Amino acid sequence: MPELTVHTLKRAITIRYGRDPAFQYLAGAPGVSAKLTPASIDIEGKDAFLSATWHGLAPAFLTRTASARDLALQLDSEFAELSLSDAAPEAILSATILCWRGRRLLLLGPGRVRTALALTLFQHDVDIEGDWFCRLSSVGFTALPRSVRWDARLLRAYPQIYEVTEDFPFHCVDSFHGELSAWCPQTEARPWLCRDGPLDGIIVTDDYAGGRSLSRRIAPDFVWGHLMAARVTGAGGVTVIAALKNLAAATPALKVSVGDLGDATYRIMQFLRILQARSSPPGSVAQYREV
């Protein structure tokens, strides 16, 4: 029976399924720093009606017998809830983490814009650690494992993504909102890793809706406001607020209003080259003042 693997920050879940390709949409097994607890799910049933049998963990929601497509979407919701619970009680932010030549970059802003930038930057040898949520803990920032996702709305907003993803081995599943695509950001030469550690730069994005992209350096208070807005949970209280305040004060940051995707990519790559060229330690106040 075919198998695929899904990782959270604490678990490695093996799914044994039939021949229906809908379940391949769920795959996502990046390398993480923690030792993972194994669990498994068996997909069973006849004809068009399937059910899931869980081993080593319990579902968070009431699962039901369904078609392959519907069951895949049910399991996707289960894994999202499980991933968030496995990251607790740490603070969670809605953000993308990228890495280029050892320099780690945090992207803030609308999810559609972040995904379009991440997909495009991958072609410029920028690794995608995560494009969903990330955890802030004592070991730094860590992307929560999940494949990169997009749908027709992103393709309408950024038609270039058709060409960007043409050769990606992505998998699709139909939903009530149209076709959803998922891709694990890795190649044979570039493994997918969800690292722990500090950040070297922050990009605050917004949707400029066409035309030339704009970029400018921004002050720490502006960055802090966006970091606070990206918080998904209130975990950590005053300690997290102070940590985000310090991060904003000590980390080089750039605001990018994304119009033309190629132009925005160029501006971000220039920012990454500046970070790469610095001799002072990542995250220092001296770095920020020089940007």
Image (cartoon, rainbow, N blue to C red):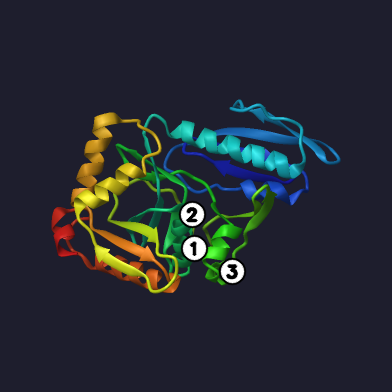
| Relative to 207, residue 222 above or below | above
Depth order, front residue of 36/68: 68
The answer to whether any part of residue 113 appears in the image is: yes
Neighbor class of circle 3 (other Cα within 10 Å; few <14, some 14-19, many 20+) is few
The residue shown at (46%, 36%) is 35
Which label lies toward us, 1 or 2? 1
The residue shown at (65%, 46%) is 4
The CA span between labels 1 and 2 is: 14 Å
Indicate the quadrant where residue 282 lies.
bottom left
Neighbor class of circle 2 (other Cα within 10 Å; few <14, some 14-19, many 20+) is many
Residue 250: x and y, percent? Answer: 19, 51
Amino acid beneath label 3: Tyr
276 horizontally vs 107: left or right? left
Task: Look at mark 3 in the image and give the residue it sits on.
Answer: 162
Depth order, front residue of 140/161: 161
Specify the quadrant that holds the C terminus: bottom left
The residue shown at (62%, 46%) is 26
Amino acid beneath label 2: Trp
Residue 286: x and y, percent? Answer: 13, 58
The CA span between labels 3 and 2 is: 22 Å
**Disc on the earlier residue, 1 or 3:** 1
Mark 2 secondary-structure assignment: loop
Indicate the quadrant where residue 212 lies.
bottom left
| Relative to 26, residue 184 above or below | below
Depth order, front residue of 221/210: 210
Which label lies toward us, 3 or 2? 3
Task: Look at mark 1 in the image and give the residue it sits on.
Answer: 119
**Disc on the earlier residue, 1 or 2:** 1
Residue lying at the far right of the rendered structure: 47
Amino acid beneath label 1: Leu
Task: Look at mark 2 in the image and give the residue it sits on.
Answer: 192
